Image (cartoon, rainbow, N blue to C red):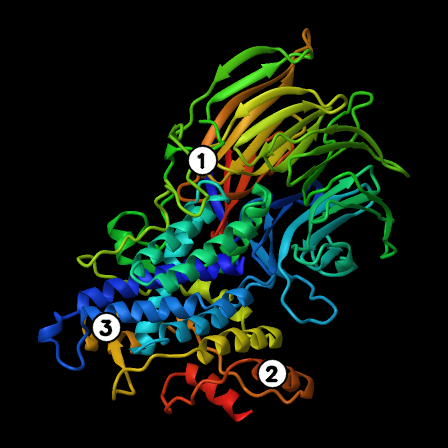
Amino acid sequence: TLPLLFLNLGGEMLYILDQRLRAQSIPGEKARKDEWTDVDRKRVMNDIITTMFNKKFMEELFKPQELYSKKALRTVYDRLAHASIMRLNQASMDKLYDLMTMAFKYQVLLCPRPKDILLVTFNHLDAIKDFIRDSPGILNQVDETVRQLIETYSCLSAGEFQLIRQTLLIFFQDMHIRVSIFLKDKVQNSNGRFVLPISGPVPWGTEVPGLIRVFNHNGDEVKRTEFTTGGNYVTPQREGSFDLYGDRVLKLGTNMYSVSRPVETHMSGSSKNLASHAKENIVPNPLAKEELNFLARLLGGLEVKKPGGSETGFRLNLFTTDEEEEHAALTRPEELSYKVINIEATQEPARRAELSRILGELEVAEPRPASSGKGEDLLALMDGL
Amino acid sequence: MYRKEKSIQLKSSSAALYNNLSVLRLPGRQLACFSAVHGPSLNVVSAAADGLGFSHRQLQAKEGGMAVSTSLLTQAAWCVLPSRVLLVLTSQKGIQMYESDGSIMVYWHALDVTEHPPAQAVFARGIAAAGGRFICVGTSSGLVLVFDIPSKGTNITVSEVLEQHHDAITDIAAELGQAPDGAGDLVTADDAGTLCVWSTGEEFTLLSKIPAFGCTCSSVKLWNGVVAAGYGNGQIRLYEAATGLLRAEVNAHARWIYALDLAPQTGKLLSGAEDSFVHVWKLSRNADTDDVEIEHCHSECVTDTQVCGARFCDPEGNSFAVTGYDLSEIFRYGQA
């Protein structure tokens, strides 16, 4: 399940970043040194996509393993988002992650068939390929990943896909953050719950409800009756393509953001649900941390292109103004804070040996200048071991 | 006709799992208990029949030996045997059995991980009391474990392992009414959609095998020799248990069916699916032709909710309860 979760969330992240970068970009000639240009935007997208589809990272991702905790996964995206010259403050990163997760939750929930999650993934990957269509090298990497997806998932049965879907839904359980664009499109209610339509095409392979057929002991149909429900369903026209290229038919997973539609979230104050959810993740899982180290380390260890003299990079704001971003950081409800993991060097010699071994296998990146992000602690820690 | 009644609040939301609601009615005590899986825990609510006064309890999935990772529950159900009632929980690590109020764990069975191929999910799922003295539980490798339950105490043993399924078990159901001769008293269902009908006893015998038609069977019920099965393509199919013959096919739902229940005294069938709908049907047998008949009685749209559990609250089917993914309440409906 992890590859599907990672790739789809990654896809949503890229949609949002692309939209924000376009919204904040200034034409090249007019831009000051600290302002975004189109060239910068393309470079950020390239850097992130290159990092995301790094061969070693993908290999590790596709190994059978348990799903990460929300905190562990969030840290991986933290690193991914910082794989380039772009910098995000905590508040913007929180908002980015909120949007990513709610979008994918919506897509998983509304998938007509569990197998359609694969179509949603292909939609994300098709769009990613479009972002980097001018760079054949990275395009190749993405195509490789699509091939691997097809190889890994095509042979799964509907029941197995439903299990994957159920696992993803448990991961997203109790998240009800309201997203402006969803509220405006009426796909989300003001209480944060998604609208489930009871009309439209039925999933491929399902019949429109209403017919009852009765057979005698010879197998002949002897009676037909019909019943009505409140729904208004129709037969679907065609099935989406599961090939490397093709018309996916399904719209879920395609880019719903455009420059003119700003991305906003409202903090849903429904603390009753969240309280129980917050309690569950308290006990740190040493195994998850080790895996987190490995994946996040992989991301951190990859080559990062740095701009000319600037060490801090360009800051991207997910909010409309800096003041809004600051305000969001101060007012974020406690139960919704992601509490990015602070990895402490464990005392157990066995664990330490394991970490060192993993370290030894990876290329060590140049030590980064000390920065305030929590993600940096990981790298610093590794260097210190 | 049914109308909505007061909901029961849960301490946490329900997970998107098949058959995610179990109801226990203890007639003498005027108490109905409800349970729904949240994820790593189970919510158990006891409600007094007058609707006032609830008590809540949460049971946790037992960790594996090493306590390395948290385990998720897949299902929970009360198993009513002549001598006792046990609350059975199935998880990714094994099977937990408690006294009916959830106060004491009387038995723990760890799943043998080596039985399963390495890259596949491991879990137990599918729970039913059978033959007046057994509890049957399914596993993700297709095995059905038959536990022999003594009338009291913790000396529960595995009496048999049934090996007819090749895919993960989804649901198991025991005969709720009167089985005609040769019709068996237990049915097991799996992810591929294959159904097996058994006769229970010291040794279980396979009576018939109903082949899959390409869809997962997520929920199954057995009543008066009729198997009612709910599928991933939204269909409900009725089969003759003794012969495996298809007797009726209903295009019931627009999405995957998650739960079926049956009221044994009237033959009412309840179905709940991801499409937000809950339907009530009536099963009957035509005395002249011996045909199995099914008619639609009522539909209820649980707005914006993917239904994951649905159960009748009484043996006539005058009331039922529903759970949905991400919902922290149990919806109740009663006859007007």
Q: Is residue B239 left or right of residue A98?
A: right
The residue positioned 78% from the left and 21% from the top of the image is B180
Q: Is residue A270 left or right of residue B227?
A: left
Residue A203 location, quadrant: top left
Q: Chain of mark 2?
A: A
**Residue where numbered disc 1 is placed:** A203
Across and down, in percent, residue A141 comes to: 43, 62
| Mark 2 or 3: the one toward you | 3
Across and down, in percent, residue A328 comes to: 28, 74
The residue positioned 45% from the left and 65% from the top of the image is A274
Residue B155 location, quadrant: bottom right
Mark nearer the N terminus (3 vs 1): 3
| Mark 1 or 2: the one toward you | 2
- Examine the rendered structure and indicate whether residue A57 appears above or below residue B97: below
- Neighbor class of circle 3 (other Cα within 10 Å; few <14, some 14-19, many 20+) is some
Q: Report the front residue among A188 and B299.
A: A188
Amino acid, disc 3: Asp
Q: Report the front residue among A125 and B132.
A: A125
Mark nearer the N terminus (1 vs 2): 1
Amino acid, disc 2: Leu
Secondary structure at numbered mark 2:
helix
Report if the CB atoms under discs 2 and 3 are less than 8 Å apart. no
Report if the CB atoms under discs 3 and 1 are less than 8 Å apart. no
- Neighbor class of circle 2 (other Cα within 10 Å; few <14, some 14-19, many 20+) is some
- For this orientation, the residue located farthest to the front is A136
**Residue where numbered disc 3 is placed:** A40
Same subunit, labels 3 and 1: the answer reads yes
- Examine the rendered structure and indicate whether residue A156 appears above or below residue B255: below
Same subunit, labels 1 and 2: the answer reads yes
